[in-house]
């Protein structure tokens, strides 16, 4: 079961969301540089791009947008369901989630430098995993249904 985020974590994420979104493109670009060092992870996106013709760029944008709305995820249920379906189509599994966390959080530090303090990154890490747990749960139900 997903642990609720503390009030402090939510406050830090919300107060830094705008700065992080303003640098969204730079953070996203850096995140993919870090993520695609792993050829197995890169292959997941190459396959997806062939089937949908879409850029995976939306992934990071969505993480940033969702983190900003971290205390009203219920309102985002349709968007979350859509992502979960796309993830199941592209074979995303729980074990892939750490790779995105390990690429996104250092990318925020790379771009924002000292403005991204350890406290800020810890809060964003918690928000990422909160969202990841929701997605992993929805995806598990979809995989089970398909089996
Ligand atoms: C909290 C974590 C994550 C969020 C918020 C997220 C968000 C998204 C969004 C918004 C899309 C586009 C959905 C659509 O077609 O409408 C997407 C697609 C995708 N995501 Fe995720 N994602 C997350 C984690 C991951 C992870 C861990 C992986 C694998 C390493 C991954 C791989 C993909 C792939 C391959 C696609 C398909 C791209 C395409 O359609 O070309 N995502 N994700």
Image (tube, rainbow, N blue to C red):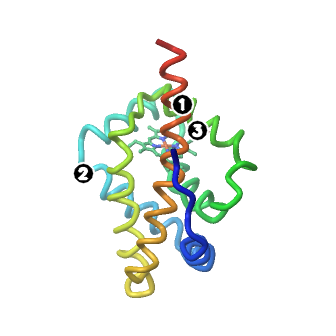
Dot 3 or dot 1, earlier in sequence:
1
Q: CA distance from mark 1 to mark 2?
A: 22 Å
Front residue of 6/16: it is: 6
Q: Is the Cβ of the residue at disc 1 closer than 8 Å to that at disc 2? A: no
Residue 52 tag number: 1
Q: Would you say 4 lies left or right of 143 here? A: right
Q: Quadrant of residue 10?
A: bottom right
Q: Nearer the viewer, mark 2 or mark 3?
A: 3
Q: Which residue is mark 3?
A: 83
Q: Position of residue 7 (x, y in %)?
A: 61, 72
- For the residue carrying disc 2, how many other residues have a C-alpha within 10 Å: few (<14), some (14-19), or many (20+)? few
Q: Would you say 139 lies left or right of 121 here? A: right
Q: CA distance from mark 2 to mark 3?
A: 24 Å
Determine whether the beta carbon of the residue marked 3 sits less than 8 angstroms from the nearest atom of ligand 1. yes
Q: Is the Cβ of the residue at disc 2 closer than 8 Å to that at disc 3? A: no
Residue extending furthest toward the top: 147
Q: Secondary structure at mark 1?
A: helix
Q: Which residue is mark 2?
A: 37
Q: Quadrant of residue 108?
A: bottom left
Q: Residue at x 70, y 42 (%)?
A: 77
Q: Residue at x 64, y 35 (%)?
A: 82
Q: Position of residue 55 (x, y in %)?
A: 51, 44
Determine whether the beta carbon of the residue marked 1 sits less than 8 angstroms from the nearest atom of ligand 1. yes
Front residue of 140/98: it is: 140
Q: Secondary structure at mark 3?
A: helix
Dot 1 or dot 2, earlier in sequence:
2
Dot 2 or dot 3, earlier in sequence:
2
Q: Nearer the viewer, mark 3 or mark 1?
A: 3
Q: Residue at x 33, y 40 (%)?
A: 95
Q: Position of residue 33 (x, y in %)?
A: 32, 57
Front residue of 40/124: it is: 124
Q: Position of residue 25 (x, y in %)?
A: 51, 65
């Amino acid at each position: 079961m997903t642990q609720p985020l503390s009030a402090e974590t939510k406050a830090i994420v919300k107060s830094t969301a705008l700065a992080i979104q303003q640098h969204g493109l730079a953070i996203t670009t850096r995140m993919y540089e870090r993520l695609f060092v792993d050829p197995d992870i890169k292959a997941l996106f190459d396959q997806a791009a062939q089937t949908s013709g879409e850029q995976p760029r939306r992934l990071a944008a969505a993480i940033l947008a969702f983190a900003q709305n971290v205390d009203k995820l219920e309102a985002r249920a349709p968007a979350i369901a859509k992502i979960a379906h796309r993830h199941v189509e592209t074979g995303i599994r729980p074990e892939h989630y750490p790779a995105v966390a390990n690429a996104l959080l250092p990318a925020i530090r790379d771009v924002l430098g000292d403005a991204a303090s350890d406290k800020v990154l810890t809060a964003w890490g918690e928000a990422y995993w909160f969202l990841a747990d929701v997605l992993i749960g929805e995806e598990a139900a979809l995989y089970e249904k398909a089996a």
